Image (cartoon, grey):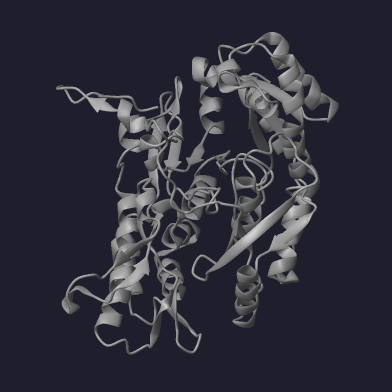
Amino acid sequence: MTLCAEEIRKLRLLCVNLPWDPYIGIKGGAAGGGYAQALPMEDLNLHFTGDFHAIGAANNLLAAMLDNHIHQGNALNIDTRRIVLKRCVDMNDRQLRNIVNGLGARVDGVPRQDGFDITVASEVMAIFCLSNSIDDLKQRLKRMIVAYNYSGEAITAGDLKAEGAMTVLLKDAIKPNLIQTLEGTPTYVHGGPFANIAHGCNSILATKMALSHHEYTITEAGFGSDLGAEKFIDIKCRENQLKPDAVVLVATVRALKKHGGAENSELNDENITALNQGMPNLLRHIDVLKNVFKLKVVVAINRFPSDTDTELEVIKSACAANNVQACISEVWSKGGAGGLELADAVIKLCKTESDLGFAYELNQGIKSKIIELAQNVYCADGVDFTKQAIQKINEAEQAGYGDLPICMAKTQYSFSDDASLLAAPNNFKITVRDIRISAGAGFIVVFTGNIMTMPGLPKIPAAENIDIDEQGNIKGLM
């Protein structure tokens, strides 16, 4: 099948996550690049429509009302050592991970240990992306657990009467943003929870709006099958009765050579040995998508100028041996015309219905669900739970939260919780050090390894290369 330009526009309707903070750090943004770019790129990757600022304001209003309640007499008997809500800011700033606030005179508040999450890791962001309406948003915000009292009972945003004002701050932000690509393809950009520390999907409202208006909808689930795809399916799809027709699994020659042991400085050089050694990573992602989640898969090889025909053929052959088609995607250099083969493959897969599966059942219990995820999706030998994690799991189940889905906070660099274990590691265990109940979002956040909800800047932040000239032209945005 050959698609005309108008059919390509129908097919390539995207729902994209939008984190801004990576632009001052290391990750890069969500506007695409080259001829596969959403516009306006600079605005999209900076403040855009102010959605992130509204989310941060709502979260920090709740934090302010919590501390004010304590300062004004603490009628709810909140234990200041068991406050679980953190303030948030849309910035990589390790200095804010652990702080002491409320210092000074008595009128300056109650001194206590506190900290910040990055906005994309806040529960308000997750609630924002999983809410189906203004009222649903308000009810979810109301259920947010902010602290525990001296009797061990949960204190919620509803107890502080904060949900109304928080919803007012989010009333415009909850509306999906419609922009377009360089070729005029309609694109919804709404929400941005990171998939390594949150659930990694755009808003359900944007997804449903796209589904109701367009023949094909392509939505992003950040990182791989072990993170974004797993959470997209086990949390977002399950809760909203969504059933994907197919999965586009994006791969690059460079990433697979990195998984095969090549150094960053060598990734532009042909290296078939490293490519073959990294190939098990791609094949494991394919296996998880096909055999755990029961979905049809096509691999999109995002071509870089340094990729050789031999390297590309190695990937295509490995995929074919596993009964999966791999298509060369050159949309960066050619726009929609560079994705015709991929478009044909997606359309073909969408003609038959998938049998969607889940990684676990909701009623299994929290520990059992974590173990199922670790063994079936990560291919771990098992899970080690710290004493703190076991205690909090027991408390969560006793409080009635045992049937909630799991949102794993785990490194994006490995199937394991150790970023140095590349390709498709075996003979490892996942370490769960802590959990957090996100009662409003409707899931249990599980912290593994050394994953953090407030990242720091790298040695050379991308911000050092961002500038603006006298005419207002921005440079240095990736």
Q: Can residue 65 be seen in this view?
A: yes
Q: Is residue 338 shown above or below 176?
A: above
Residue at the (76%, 48%) spot, across then down: 428
Q: Where is residue 30 in the image (x, y as percent from the top left)?
A: 45, 35
Q: Would residue 314 appear left or right of 388 to someone viewing this image? A: right
The N terminus sits in image quarter:
top right
Q: Tag count in the figure?
A: 0
Q: Is residue 354 shown above or below 277?
A: below
Q: Would residue 352 appear left or right of 46 to someone viewing this image? A: right
Residue at the (23%, 75%) spot, across then down: 109
Q: Residue furthest left?
A: 470
Q: Which of 396 and 228 is in front in this view?
A: 396
Image quadrant in which you'd find residue 324: top right
Q: Which of 316 and 446 is in front in this view?
A: 446
Residue at the (33%, 69%) spot, across then down: 63
Q: Is residue 3 visible?
A: no
The C terminus sits in image quarter:
top left
Residue at the (40%, 40%) spot, across then down: 457
Q: Would residue 345 appear left or right of 478 to someone viewing this image? A: right
Q: Would residue 62 appear left or right of 366 to someone viewing this image? A: left
Q: Position of residue 289 (x, y in %)?
A: 74, 43
Image quadrant in which you'd find residue 257: top right
Q: Where is residue 35 in the image (x, y as percent from the top left)?
A: 45, 20
Q: Where is residue 213 in the image (x, y as percent from the top left)?
A: 50, 44
